Amino acid sequence: MIPFTPLTSHMTPDAPHDYAPLHLYVDGRFLQADGRRTQPVLDPGTGRVLGELPHATADDIDAAVHAAHRAFAAWRRESPLVRSDILRRAAALVRERADTIGRHITMDQGKPLREAIAEVVTSAEQLEWHAEEGRRTYGRVVPSRSPDVAQTVLREPIGVCAAFSPWNFPFSQAMHKIAAALASGCTLVLKGPEESPSAIVALARIFHDAGLPAGCLNIVWGAPGDVSKQLIESPLVRKISFTGSVPVGKQLAALAASHMKRMTMELGGHAPVLVCADADIERAATMLAAYKFRNAGQVCVSPTRFFVQRPVFERFAAAYLDAVGRIRVGYGLEDATTMGPLAHARRVSEIDAFVANARAKGAEIAAGGTVLPGPGHYFAPTVVLGPSRDTRLMNEEPFGPIVGIVPFDALDDALAEANRLPFGLASYAFTESARNAHRISRALEAGMVNINHFGMGPAEIPFGGVKDSGFGSEGGTETFDGYLVTKFITQMN
């Protein structure tokens, strides 16, 4: 096993306590606790309490929905040019405030500061793209069978949306939902992640300062089950957008379906990677090591199940282990840190259980595999060689810094194993053969296939999965499909 030497600075980080104030945002007003129940927000790198997050009461949630409903009456009829201008102003504010917002994300979510700032900066592009594309949600004229009849197809905003965004990318994931809804002419109530809330409060402040009319965006916090039930069951809410785990997504989908609510579901993944013998092995290993352990592996599209063609298996494993050995774990605000803590203590115990299961079933723990000492939720980047098909690692999404690497002989076998699980979000392949690339891209059961690079994420690209990984897309022109309804008008003159 390759020894792993983390940074030691994470044990006694001396970061200034400059965390952002936390609020609800309802009908254009920022609301403090004022007698409401609060929840402590913790720094996953230190365990320190950063602040207290006010939970919305049932009346607060009802007020947010009604505010969104009232605002929708005007926002839906607002000129797309005016909506576009507001989104552009918000994008400029995102860029201006990126350093501060990123710092607070590192404090409450844990990722290295460079990753946090990059998450914020790239989100500005989401606003700019939606600002432009939202001006082009065209309908069409259908030639009629009678010269006296005019036939028109319109695309109209669906109404009030309830959005639920995750803790792992708190700024960018919420931005996907906000940008698409507002550009479509919809209003929304967003329940963000209570674990990493500063990014959501910053978003509310940005749109407030950009001149978004009151009620178009509302932010609530609270017990997830209670808040989601009240929002989904409200007759004023017409659309649900959720990013999160498969089990929770299925529960919310069942509830939404019982009320005939339109849905976009971006759920979990367990992304396979196919490395063919003709690939650029060193390049693939280096790229995959960096991509796998960003945000400590807490990424729904994280490459996790590696299938490497047997003639290059040892070479790939050695190159990959070498790249992983250069990762430095530490507090996210430390300059040398390349991987921060896990977001919760429960993630540490869960990854530890994955390691124990793989070891018990005969796999080699070639790197990491240990909880790191000190305050905070740190786990060493872990590489498991030869995990058997029945290990948890090869069947369940780990959502953390652990990867399994196994050899394959025939490409058909690797494809069958890649498709064996019910997940179908992201997938990856490395090959220099056009024939292999074509075959792999058509055979993989995934909403997104990346060959020889990582190409997901730009605003113009649809992001979404198939099978248990959900349905609908965020990004690309497809994103508007979830927020617009089709109306047919036929008129005889």
Image (cartoon, grey):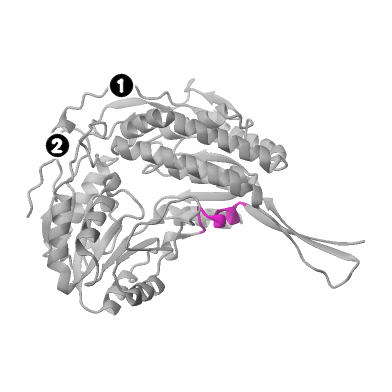
The percent position of residue 179, horizontal first and vertical second, equals: 55, 43
Q: Tell me the number on the disc at residue 17.
A: 1
Q: Is residue 5 visible?
A: yes
According to the picture, the residue beneath numbered tag 2 turns out to be 7
Badge 1 amino acid? His
Residue at the image position 26 percent from the left and 55 percent from the top: 287
3D distance between C-alphas at marks 2 and 1:
22 Å
Occupied quadrant, residue 195: top left
The percent position of residue 264, horizontal first and vertical second, equals: 52, 54
Number of numbered discs overlaid on the protein picture: 2
Give yes or no for residue 476 being in the magenta stretch: yes
- 205 left or right of 17 in image: right
Q: Looking at the image, is 341 positioned above or below residue 435?
A: above
The secondary element bearing badge 2 is classed as loop
The secondary element bearing badge 1 is classed as loop
Give the crowd class for mark 1: few <14, some 14-19, many >=20 residues within 10 Å. few
Quadrant where the C terminus sits is: bottom right
The percent position of residue 243, horizontal first and vertical second, equals: 45, 50
Residue at the image position 28 percent from the left and 49 percent from the top: 297
Residue at the image position 25 percent from the left and 56 percent from the top: 288
Quadrant where the N terminus sits is: bottom left
Q: Earlier in the sequence, mark 2 or mark 1?
A: 2
Identify which residue, 350 or 321, lies in the foreground.
321
Q: Looking at the image, is 396 positioned above or below residue 109?
A: below
- 79 left or right of 399 in image: right
Q: Looking at the image, is 329 positioned above or below residue 405?
A: above
Q: Is residue 56 visible?
A: no
Residue at the image position 64 percent from the left and 39 percent from the top: 83
- 19 left or right of 35 in image: left
Give the crowd class for mark 2: few <14, some 14-19, many >=20 residues within 10 Å. some
Q: Looking at the image, is 466 positioned above or below residue 48?
A: below
**Residue numbers of the magenta segment:** 472-483
